[in-house]
Amino acid sequence: MAVLPLLTDDQLSDKARAVFDDIRATRQTDYVNNFWRALAHNPDELEAVWGRLKRIMGPGALDPLVKEMLYIAVSAANACEYCCHSHTASARAKGMSDEMYSELLSVIGMASHTNALATALQVPPDDAFKA
Amino acid sequence: MAVLPLLTDDQLSDKARAVFDDIRATRQTDYVNNFWRALAHNPDELEAVWGRLKRIMGPGALDPLVKEMLYIAVSAANACEYCCHSHTASARAKGMSDEMYSELLSVIGMASHTNALATALQVPPDDAFKA
Amino acid sequence: MAVLPLLTDDQLSDKARAVFDDIRATRQTDYVNNFWRALAHNPDELEAVWGRLKRIMGPGALDPLVKEMLYIAVSAANACEYCCHSHTASARAKGMSDEMYSELLSVIGMASHTNALATALQVPPDDAFKA
Amino acid sequence: MAVLPLLTDDQLSDKARAVFDDIRATRQTDYVNNFWRALAHNPDELEAVWGRLKRIMGPGALDPLVKEMLYIAVSAANACEYCCHSHTASARAKGMSDEMYSELLSVIGMASHTNALATALQVPPDDAFKA
Amino acid sequence: MAVLPLLTDDQLSDKARAVFDDIRATRQTDYVNNFWRALAHNPDELEAVWGRLKRIMGPGALDPLVKEMLYIAVSAANACEYCCHSHTASARAKGMSDEMYSELLSVIGMASHTNALATALQVPPDDAFKA
Amino acid sequence: MAVLPLLTDDQLSDKARAVFDDIRATRQTDYVNNFWRALAHNPDELEAVWGRLKRIMGPGALDPLVKEMLYIAVSAANACEYCCHSHTASARAKGMSDEMYSELLSVIGMASHTNALATALQVPPDDAFKA
């Protein structure tokens, strides 16, 4: 359960409806997932978050699929249940193969392991890393 | 400062020395960074961690540079000072451009933002995400 | 499901019952939420945690509603499912409006975003911040 | 040390300089802190982050000082060294008294304590919290 | 729900089946829990993770029960729902009494409290702690 | 640097001085570490935190050394620089051997690894774990 009701299409303000229209057009599907239905209580924030997500996650110097895998990595480290689900589904939709997902999980596991060791040991950064 | 002294080359056990030799051969540099010098107090763990890192971070279904960027993403979310430094340096050495780094930071920032919102709102995962 | 059974009123020790009585009197409601029913297995800890919570969350230099919003902020960052639910409900009960909640979410999102950037970049604190 | 050099005023692009001008005008001080000097490598992101921060942290349904204290709370939970320093300094500048800071720390400590307990115990959210 | 289907015994590859056989023999029970059924999609990782877990969590300088309690402590701090459940069950099976569990929770709560304070205050480590 | 000045002995209030006296008597050393010198700005909180720490970390169903190792585990997972230093020093002082510390690090690393996997995969807790 969410701390706020998830808004159905007929409960949207005009501004929120326009964002939902853009989500549907951009993703070429009628389905709008729960995250946006929770954010829709605040149409300004809904518009701002969707606008940035659309811009940042699109093509650029990094491939959109790589960006989805980066999103999964951050979401796992931040223990975000919803985002692990939604971005794994997005990465699958963008072509993440079983082999890619297996390697992604291995890197997430490895990084979490050495993050914990370096922090427990309080290893000082090398002078060689200095910018 | 570390909670343990960082071992110099002449303080290594035979097993730790062999791992350092492999680090140097694999990376084609004489430089061995502080993390391994802290781990070298426990040669079995040193060998195991290095062995897995070498295998996981090598080429596969994902590019080694993509893996380094995933490592940075996890390290930032876990607030690991050392790993942010070391893996940003590694990613640079593997060809991460300024444009790629800028987009990486944008994705890390975006994911951290929506992770926090989805968690605060406790948005329930959609049935559509079910495996 | 919890890792321990949630105790019903008739399963409480005398000490735990006295704490439940004080929770009911302080909050002016007969309802005692699940957190306390899980803690009640250890009446000493139950008494200590409730006592501190009652003291800290009461009026002082900060308004009790501000304190509830701070609690939500920490709970979201720590990814505590239960506490996001319980303290959002408490903040609502203490008068948090929709507008206040929207701004709270915006600050939580913004802080999570720049926390991640400052950590990824390992920005050194300015001398100007020195105490 | 940062993973990127901190840009001095004479190293800024035109776009970054315009943002720095707005930071100075908004805060009514010539001092621009390190965070913005690290972000200035990416003028578009600099502009976007500053723009949102300026809008979100300004007056609204919540007082700007309350927002700074919420920022400290999130930053402490996310273990962001830089942000703990910078936002404590900002809160002081906006009028946070010693008494307010003491209570803020008490709430952060209390929330971190019960977050850990509720998570360890996996207490299920009460039906009474349902939106 | 998991992001991947949990594999049943008749869906296992030969390599995964061999790992399940070893889990059953080591734990002297026919029951194999969900974590391994999710990992079984990648038999190499399944084998590697189980092999390390079996070695690390066995007897040594630290008692296996102490190791399970350390695992609970890390899992609570990392907000891992599954691991809080599974390792609390394991610790119970290895003899953790109610008194031990109560003290474990008190230490987890205390550490989370002072971690947050030390981070918010950015207390510098004492020279006396230097290795 | 801390966000507050660390108080020297001659800057303490009477109440803070009494706590410092008790720290010195309990630990049988004249040295009082920085954490308490930062907390001393708020004598009530200083007294409360020290009192609980003294009670919780003393002998009970768990050995004081085990408690210190649990504290290190939580502190590493929470990325608390100060607490990793201070509690590793405390554990050493209470008899933690090199072998014990090596195994502690292995458990912290292993738990961090599987926490990340279980979270990324969103593995549902087994019915068998139900209390």
Image (tube, coloured by chain):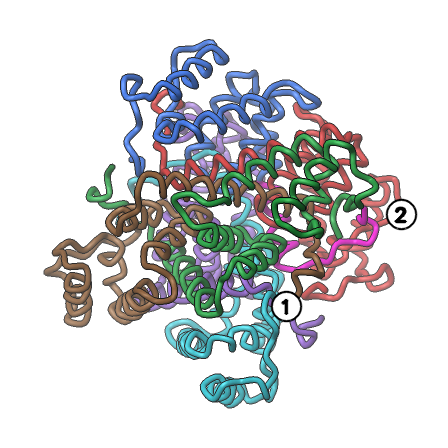
Chain colours: A red, B blue, C cyan, D purple, E green, F brown
Residue at figure coordinates x 77%, y 57% from the top left: A37
State the extent of the magenta-drawn residues as a range: B109-131
Quadrant in the picture for residue A40: bottom right
- Residue C43 x %, y %: 45, 79
Indicate the amino acid at tag 1: Ala
Residue at figure coordinates x 18%, y 72% from the top left: F15
Indicate the amino acid at tag 2: Asp
Which residue appears farthest toward the left when viewing the image? F10
Residue at figure coordinates x 50%, y 44% from the top left: E58
**Left or right for C44, reference F129:** left
Q: Viewer-proximal residue, B19 or A123?
A: B19
Task: Tell me the SS state at disc 1.
Answer: loop
Category of crowding for the residue at label 1, using alpha-carbon neighbours closer than 10 angstroms: few (below 14), some (14–19), many (at least 20)? few
Task: Tell me the SS state at disc 2.
Answer: loop
Residue A102: within the magenta?
Answer: no
Specify whether residue C59 is in view: no
> Which-is-in-front pick, marks 1 and 2?
1
Marks 1/2: CA distance?
A: 42 Å
> Mark 2 sits on what residue?
A30
C48 vs F31: above or below: below
Q: Chain ID for label 2?
A: A
In which quadrant will I find the N terminus of chain D? top left
